[in-house]
Image (tube, helix red, strand yellow):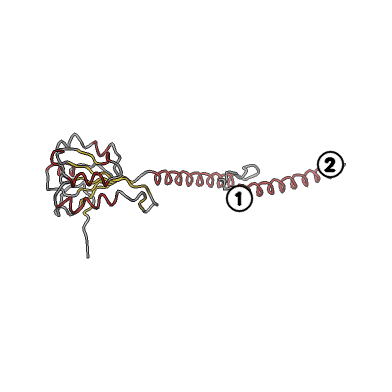
Amino acid sequence: KSPYNAKKESSISKKKKKRKDKKDKKVKVETMKKEGKEQKIEEPMEGLRPEEQEALLAKRAGAAQRRDEEEERDAALREPLRVGFLSAHLRKHSICKLFCGVIGGLSNPAIVPTPRGARPLEVYAFSSLQENHEDNHTKALIASLAHKDRFVRVGKTVVSNRNEVTRRGIDVLVFLDVGMDPSTMIWASARLAPLQLCLWGHPTTTESSHMDYFVSSFD
C-alpha cells in the first residue's frame, strides 16, 4: 500500500471509531435515563482548542455548582422547621385561651409548605411559668404536642436557660405576650433564633432590635 492509501485508511478508521464511540455514548446515556440513573458522562477534552477547553471547564464547573446547590436544598428540606412559642401564661389565662389551641393545632401536621418546598414541622412550647402554677390547661397543651419533651420549662431563670432555645436549633421563635412578665422581656432583648416575632397577647411595641415582626389579624 502507498503511504497515501495507508493514511487515508487510517483517517477513515478514526472517523468510524469516532462515530461508533458517539453512538455507544448515546445508547449508554439513553439506557441510564431509562434506568433513572444520574448522567455523569463528561465530554472529552482531547482535540479541543484552548478556548473550547476553557468553555467546557466552565460548563462543568457550573454543572457541579448546580448539583451542590440542589443537594444543599434537598438536605435543607429534609431538616424539620422548628418553631418555638414562649410565654409565662401557659395555664388558665387569656393568653392560653387565645394561643394554646393554635400551638396544639400546629403540632399535628407533619409537613408544612415553605417558599423552598415542603418541610417537616416541629413545634415547641417554652414556658417560664413556675411548675407549681401549672394546671389542667397546661396539661392539655402538653398532651397536644407531638412529644412531651417539646414542652420546655425554663422557669424564671431565663438568662441561664436561653440555651434551651439555641441548643434545639429553633428556626422561628414566637413571643406570645412580651411585656406581661419580666422573664419574656429578658428573652426579647436577645437574638435566640434566626427569625423572631411577637403576637398580640400584649399589643405594644417591644422596642427590641431583635424582634423581626409583629403578627396581627385583619378583617
**Alpha-carbon neighbours of circle 1 within 10 Å: few (<14), some, or many (≥20)?**
few
The outermost residue toward the bottom is 219
The N terminus sits in image quarter: top right
Instruction: Name the residue that disc number 1 marks.
Output: 34
- Image position, residue 204 (x, y; %): 14, 53
For discs 2 and 1, the disc positioned in front in the rendered view: 1
Looking at the image, which is closer to me, 206 or 99?
A: 99
Q: SS for tag 1?
A: helix
Pick the front one: 85 or 15? 85
Q: Tag count in the figure?
A: 2
**Residue type, mark 2 in image:** Pro
In the rendered image, the residue lying farthest to the right is 1
Left-right relation of 63 to 130: right
Given contact means CB atoms under 8 Å apart, are the residues at marks 2 and 1 in contact? no
Q: Residue furthest top?
A: 160
In-front residue for pair 40/11: 40
Of the two numbered discs 2 and 1 on the same chain, state the one appearing first in sequence: 2
Q: Give how far across and how far down residue 84 sits, in percent.
A: 26, 45
- Residue at image position (54%, 45%) is 60
Residue position for label 2: 3
The residue drawn where x is 36% and y is 47% is 120
SS of the residue at dot 2? helix
Give the residue type at disc 1: Lys
